[in-house]
């Protein structure tokens, strides 16, 4: 994705490297010992229709640059652009393409395949949006075949027009159907890229983690993957998107377009920005201000998608899937904007820290302190100001549910490394990716000489071991026990890497949102960094 | 701009590095020994008004991420994305910000300042659009202060509404006025970043080279820069944009918006995409199909801008400016799409090469062959298929004109290195930038082990020497004589670096477009690479 300092000439010739796929030949490149194929089309789209196989082509298709990524309603500078650097790219509705990093283009090798689903809710993002997603180091370090996928998002991926005709029956789940199509393409083609179609791990973070969870409850995907990893993708008691509310959103969008059931087909050809504007207006009618991210997502139609949360059991067909499920300490409660106070948290005196903890946690302050000290004995107490409950609890619950329902082994983890930005910052949403993609020494806000190299070897090693065998344990790391029989096992990834048991039960109990005072501290937005010109920008 | 493999922690703390500017404090970062300040606002904008000083701010403004870049009418995947990789970013009309790379934040150091104007005609691009633009290596290698600038482009930078009222008098030259404002900011502030306000070199490539040439003919910029470098920015006999045609474009745009002189002020608030669509329609009326790049540019009003070409003399006020002026062998006549034939040019047999040369050059074929062999004795004759005339002649003419008018020394150069892509490709438009920004070993299509390191040391060394002294000569390179007394001097940057005299006069004469057959060879567009989905895409 990003230029790497090279030591060898890159090979990108008319006749090498070339791989035959079911639809035609593709030409990639060979860079520092890794073959890269960018923008390989895995399906073709017609707006609001299910993905279809790509029309076969003659000759060799050049796949040495990324394909277009899905259109976004807004593409502002992210608020966390410094610590989570983004790679923007040309956007198009015709975005069903994927990228491959592999050390082999040989049918006989059959290495594990890891298919990455990107984050950004179901509204934004791309296979190449974050620098941390670059698959080259992971493919090289782990000798695995890394695939990352673009698919339809927002109003072209999840607008449920099913009330407007049978042809739109699945239009609320097209973004998911695209991911299934990508897995079908991997199944049919990955052997040519050195991959084993019978050993495919799906993994993703944030929205991408949700997409992994969604895949397990999507019958169309059965058999196309064999292991699954969810990273910061599960919120506590997150409601599934009901079809009722999804249809309401669609009805309002259609109204704002001035269309009716009689001329609904015009929605297939209005310019994207017109459709997006109507969707924004519809979302505003439902309480989401224009300019903020709309909560798109798979529609619980009990047909294409069977639901994740709220007591819906795991499907028998996916109980054999081993899983890694975990998240990071801070998530969105981190301090990358120096919230709560000026300067760097590690420079504050005890009095200031004490005041802030009392202010944030009220009568729970002591319980939070005690819970935090027990959970994270190596850490400073100030970090409890930045500890996330809703994500951590979501992942714990998911693991316990898998274990209780007799599923294949599930391994829980917590990434709690303090990162150097601002003189020390609690691990933020997305911070783990650099460490399991083996890219930590490329990221300005994350790199700690010595520490980063060692931890990314351990974490990437665990992800790779899991992709090979379904068990993340490897000789370079303390033993990682699965969640089982209520053991509360959790692997802590930090300067010290170790297994803990029920380590943060007290902390999570203390952070029960019902017991906490309402959040009165507003985040002072510094100038710059996503607020250039003030506020979220209207990109249309 | 891109993540670099790090060896040290990056410092980006609340209190360091911080620099006081005239409008307030800015906070950047320290990375591998280089201070970086991103997205520093140098002016603020109101649509169609001249740039104004930024309102002073309280506290410290965080400048560790890039600021928004100018809105573009289209942002498709570039046709040459593989060999000229692009870094897209969030777009906004409020885009008047610049980036700084420097090894010092000390008033007393006073290092030479190099201010980069980006390419993309006057329609597209940004200070960070090409990976080659990253200023870190240049700042580090040369110990110079590198600045790169965003400014208004296309319909918000160059739409001449001067017929609609005095307030719009300069609206056709706002993009240029923004650049002047950036130079004013550099003059007022760069000492705090270790720079010498009395030694500022402006440099740019393609549209950026035109912007440099424009600056010399823009009285408002006088005294704000001291040296100038034009790279691939001058076309032979390029007409200046007349105010008459610029006003016609504006009239049609206003008409398509449904506005009149009475309610013209509404043009200041219509959404950008509405304005852009009207401008596209206007350009289509004038013969530029929708979806292709519109030829925006500074307006020759004989007031703000005094014109470059067609016999207009250099201004007395700029005759003391020393210059580097040069271009590359292939420009847009290169073979990055394997034009003319299948495979790699270096694998073709003599018969095929002979046939193609005859086909392309007709009765001039022998003269072109002879001229090429004389001009570039180290090169293969097949390369004459990819040799540009119109750019090369434009730069020769400019140098000769400077010399004839008694200006300060002007040095001419030609970058002719064959690059490894496709088994060997003639130097393309933009290929030189990686070599004078010292980034050649980051670019997939350009890196040749050993050769790239040596050539970028030489070329970057020459650019830096010029910024220091006005003379590009340095001990690591053969002597580079200025153009003088019709000596036809030109420095050749290739595997061999040497001064030549009148080396390609015969070749240029042979390539006289009046003598050549009409171009009948159409370029077969491969799938992928900017044509995903077919044809230029409509991004609105």
Image (cartoon, coloured by chain):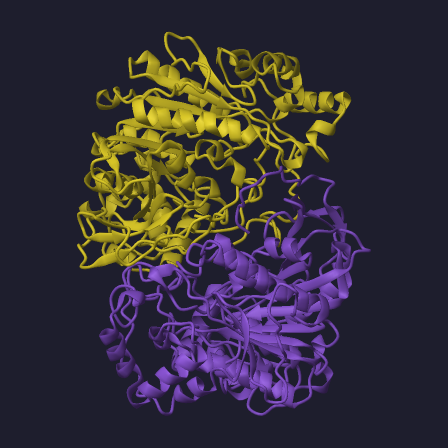
Chain colours: A purple, B yellow
Question: Residue at point 56% right, 56% down?
Answer: A134
- Residue B55, x across and y down, in percent: 18, 54
Asked if residue B194 is positioned above or below residue A313 in the image, the reply reads: above
- From this viewpoint, is residue A100 visible? no
Asked if residue B415 is positioned above or below residue A456 in the image, the reply reads: above
Query: Considering depth in this image, is A53 or B143 the residue closer to the camera?
Result: B143
Query: Considering depth in this image, is B346 or B162 the residue closer to the camera?
Result: B346
- Residue B37, x across and y down, in percent: 32, 48
Q: Is residue B502 left or right of residue B306?
A: right
Give the image quarter of residue A479: bottom right
Q: Is residue A495 left or right of residue B122?
A: right
Asked if residue B469 is positioned above or below residue A58 in the image, the reply reads: above
- From this viewpoint, is residue B509 visible? yes
Asked if residue B132 is positioned above or below residue A65 in the image, the reply reads: above
- Residue A332, x across and y down, in percent: 41, 73
Q: How many marks?
A: 0
Question: Residue most toward the right?
Answer: A108
Query: Considering depth in this image, is B96 or A226 the residue closer to the camera?
Result: A226
């Amino acid at each position: 994705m990003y230029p790497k300092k090279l030591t060898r000439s890159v090979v990108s010739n008319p006749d090498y490297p070339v791989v035959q796929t079911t639809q035609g030949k593709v030409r990639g490149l060979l860079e520092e010992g890794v073959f890269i194929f960018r923008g390989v089309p895995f399906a073709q789209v017609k707006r609001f229709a299910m993905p279809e196989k790509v029309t076969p082509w003659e000759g060799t298709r050049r796949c040495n640059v990324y394909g277009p990524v899905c259109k976004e309603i807004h593409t502002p500078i992210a608020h966390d652009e410094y610590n989570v650097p983004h790679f923007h790219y040309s956007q198009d509705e015709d975005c069903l393409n994927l990228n491959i990093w592999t050390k082999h283009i040989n049918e006989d090798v059959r290495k594990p395949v890891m298919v990455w689903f990107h984050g950004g809710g179901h509204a934004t993002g791309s296979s190449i949006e974050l620098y941390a997603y670059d698959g080259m180091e992971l493919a090289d370090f782990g000798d695995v075949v890394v695939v990352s996928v673009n698919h339809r998002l927002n109003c072209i991926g999840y607008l449920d027009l099913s009330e407007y005709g049978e042809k739109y029956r699945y239009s609320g789940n097209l973004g998911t159907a695209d991911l299934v199509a990508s897995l079908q393409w991997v199944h049919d083609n990955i052997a040519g890229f050195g991959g084993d179609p019978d050993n495919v791990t799906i993994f993703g973070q944030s929205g991408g983690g949700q997409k992994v969870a969604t895949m397990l409850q999507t019958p169309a995907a059965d058999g196309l993957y064999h292991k699954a990893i969810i990273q910061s993708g599960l919120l506590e008691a997150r409601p599934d998107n009901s079809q009722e509310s999804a249809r309401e959103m669609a009805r309002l969008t259609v109204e704002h377009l001035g269309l009716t059931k009689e001329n609904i087909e015009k929605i297939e050809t209005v310019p994207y920005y017109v459709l997006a504007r109507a969707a924004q207006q519809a979302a505003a009618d439902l309480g989401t201000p224009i300019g903020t991210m709309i909560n798109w997502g798979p529609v619980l139609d009990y047909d294409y998608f069977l639901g994740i949360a709220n007591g819906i059991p795991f499907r028998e067909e996916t109980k054999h899937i081993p899983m890694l499920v975990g998240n990071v300490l801070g998530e969105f409660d981190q301090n990358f904007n120096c919230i709560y106070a000026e300067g760097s948290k590690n420079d504050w005196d005890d009095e200031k820290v004490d005041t802030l903890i009392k202010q944030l946690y009220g009568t729970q302050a002591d319980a939070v302190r005690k819970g935090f000290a027990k959970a994270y004995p190596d850490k400073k107490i100030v970090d409890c100001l930045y500890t996330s409950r809703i994500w951590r609890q979501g992942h714990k619950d998911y693991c316990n549910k898998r274990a209780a329902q007799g599923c294949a082994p599930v391994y829980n983890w917590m990434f709690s490394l303090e990162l150097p930005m601002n003189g020390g910052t609690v691990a933020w949403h997305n911070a783990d990716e650099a460490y399991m993609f083996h890219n930590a020494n490329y990221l300005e806000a994350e790199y700690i000489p010595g520490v980063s190299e060692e931890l990314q070897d351990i974490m990437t090693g665990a992800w790779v071991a899991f992709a090979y065998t379904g068990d993340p344990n490897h000789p370079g790391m303390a033993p990682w026990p699965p969640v089982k029989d209520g053991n509360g096992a959790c692997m802590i990834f930090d300067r010290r890497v170790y297994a803990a048991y029920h380590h943060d039960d007290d902390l999570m109990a203390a952070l029960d949102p019902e017991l906490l005072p309402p959040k009165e501290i507003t985040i002072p937005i510094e100038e710059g960094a996503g607020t250039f010109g003030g506020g979220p920008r209207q990109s249309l």
